[in-house]
Amino acid sequence: MKEKSLFAQRLTDRRIKLKFTQESFANLVGMSRARYANYEQSRREPDFEIAKLFAEHLKTTTDYLLGYDDYDRRPTTPPRHNKPKDLLKFLDESEVMFDGVPLTEEDKEKVRKALELAFWDAKQQNKRKKS
């Protein structure tokens, strides 16, 4: 039996993680279960449109499914935090990423300034509403 390709393994893993059966996922993407199963068994390779369709419904990227990226950028569930975090402290204390790329200190400073501007603007609008 042929060993599963990375694409086939990731396709299977994402489908299972999202709690789809082969049948339910095949129906969702508009194909027969048998045709879909061929992708999971490495008997068939996707064209661009099929890869995009799978990635969209599996809440991931084509780069991840195809093995060009090892980081699955689209989480299936939002992260859970035990307590609220101050955004500015979070920027200072954490390795912050945007679209899978770590922010430099210069990038973090730009984010801080943008946040300050947005919050100042919101305060001004609230003052006008109260007047």
Image (cartoon, grey):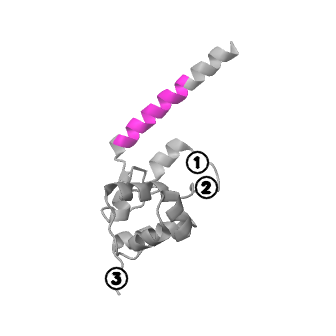
Which residue occupies 39% across, 70% down?
Answer: 39
Q: Are marks 2 and 1 in contact (CB under 8 Å)?
A: yes
* Label number found at residue 3: 3
Report the amino acid beneath label 2: His
Please provide the residue range marked out in magenta: 107-121
Which residue occupies 46% across, 62% down?
Answer: 31
Main SS, magenta residues:
helix
Report the amino acid beneath label 1: Lys
Q: Nearer the viewer, residue 17 or 26?
A: 26
Q: Are marks 3 and 2 in contact (CB under 8 Å)?
A: no
Magenta-drawn stretch contains 62: no
Q: Is residue 116 above or below residue 23?
A: above
* Residue count near mark 1 (Cα–Cα under 10 Å), binned few <14, some 14–19, many ≥20: few
* Label number found at residue 81: 2
Give the Cα distance between marks 1 and 3.
45 Å
Give x and y (percent) for residue 46: 34, 63
